[in-house]
Image (cartoon, rainbow, N blue to C red):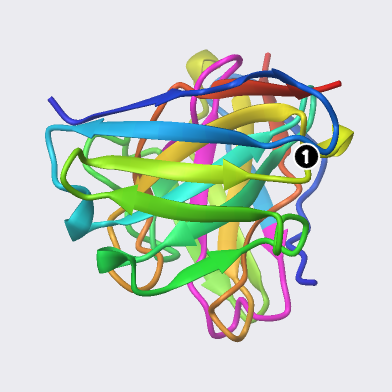
């Protein structure tokens, strides 16, 4: 069964760091692009970051560039979001999502249920 | 920064047609994707590459694009189509990805 499960969310003080994990099952992360998308309480979706196939190219939203980084553990099929210098405005539900594209978006077809980060 | 603009809300009666627009300067050259998000759920891809409907998405959902405006159409909207809808695309460089501002669709 193709599935994504996020973990690692919690309450953290401003300026601190947190690492989110996205565990994939039923498919190999290497064959897909992977995104992080967030949604602040009562707000719309905000794209955060993407790593394309083989992790050769990563892109970030301006709001997180220089503070957040993405990485993969290929042996365990886990996708990470490393967040540092957290701000109150980073409070959100964070979703990971699989992209059918290898080097550019072809649609995010599998999503996790999200993990909540509260910066306070 | 790059922005995709959508109407805040659209209301239709069951069986009517709902149209949601998405405006962005780069849409004439970049594909638009559409996502449906129901309350407290993860988003679902309903239209890919301007017009392509993924497997399992009802045929009443369709997409089109002309110039800098993409449109999601729900023909014969059902009560279960009530949700927030977001367009998604890239800027002209292809490196910056962005969701639209979102449209709340009410079917009542």
Q: Residue at x 46, y 50 (%)?
A: A35
Is residue B40 on the magenta stretch?
yes
In what element is the residue under mark 1?
loop
- Residue B10 placed where, x, y %? 75, 35
Visible residue check, residue A89 = yes
Q: Residue at x 77, y 29 (%)?
A: A91
Q: Residue furthest front?
A: A16
Q: Overall secondary structure of the magenta stretch? A: loop
Q: Residue at x 73, y 62 (%)?
A: B4
Visible residue check, residue B82 = no
- Give the crowd class for mark 1: few <14, some 14-19, many >=20 residues within 10 Å: many
Residue nearer the viewer, B7 or A18:
A18
Is residue A87 on the magenta stretch?
no
- Residue B74 placed where, x, y %? 51, 39
Q: Quadrant of the N terminus of chain B?
A: bottom right
Residue nearer the viewer, A51 or A107:
A51
Q: Return the chain for callout 1.
A: A
Q: Residue at x 68, y 55 (%)?
A: B21
**Does B76 sit above or below residue A51?**
above
**Does B100 sit above or below residue A87?**
below
Which residue position holds label 1? A86
- Residue B39 placed where, x, y %? 61, 15
Q: From the viewer's perspective, is A76 left or right of B39?
A: left
**Does A49 sit above or below residue A116?**
below
Residue nearer the viewer, A101 or B79:
A101
For residue A106, which quarter of the picture? bottom left
Marks counted in the figure total 1
Residue nearer the viewer, A80 or B19:
A80
Q: Which residues are magenta?
A: B22-44
Q: Quadrant of the C terminus of chain B?
A: top right
- Residue B59 placed where, x, y %? 32, 40
For residue B97, which quarter of the picture? bottom right
């Amino acid at each position: 069964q193709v599935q994504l499960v996020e973990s690692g969310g919690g309450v953290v003080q401003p300026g601190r760091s947190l690492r989110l994990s996205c565990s994939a099952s039923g498919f190999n992360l290497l064959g897909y692009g992977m995104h992080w998308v967030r949604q602040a309480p009562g707000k719309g979706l905000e794209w955060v970051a993407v790593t394309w196939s083989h992790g050769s190219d990563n892109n970030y939203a301006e709001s997180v560039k220089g503070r957040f980084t993405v990485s993969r553990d290929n042996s365990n099929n886990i996708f990470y979001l490393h967040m540092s210098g957290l701000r109150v405005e980073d409070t959100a539900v964070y979703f990971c999502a699989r992209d059918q594209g290898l080097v550019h978006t072809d649609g995010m077809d599998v999503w996790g249920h999200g993990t909540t980060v509260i910066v306070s | 920064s790059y922005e995709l603009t959508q109407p805040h809300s659209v209301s239709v009666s069951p069986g009517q047609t709902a149209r949601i627009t998405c405006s962005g300067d780069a849409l004439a050259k970049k594909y638009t994707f559409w996502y449906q998000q129901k309350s407290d759920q993860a988003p679902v891809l309903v239209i890919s590459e301007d017009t392509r409907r993924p497997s399992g998405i009802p045929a009443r959902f369709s997409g089109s694009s002309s110039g800098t405006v993409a449109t999601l159409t729900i023909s014969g909207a059902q009560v279960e189509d009530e949700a927030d809808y977001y367009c998604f695309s890239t800027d002209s460089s292809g490196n910056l990805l962005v969701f639209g501002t979102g449209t709340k669709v009410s079917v009542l």
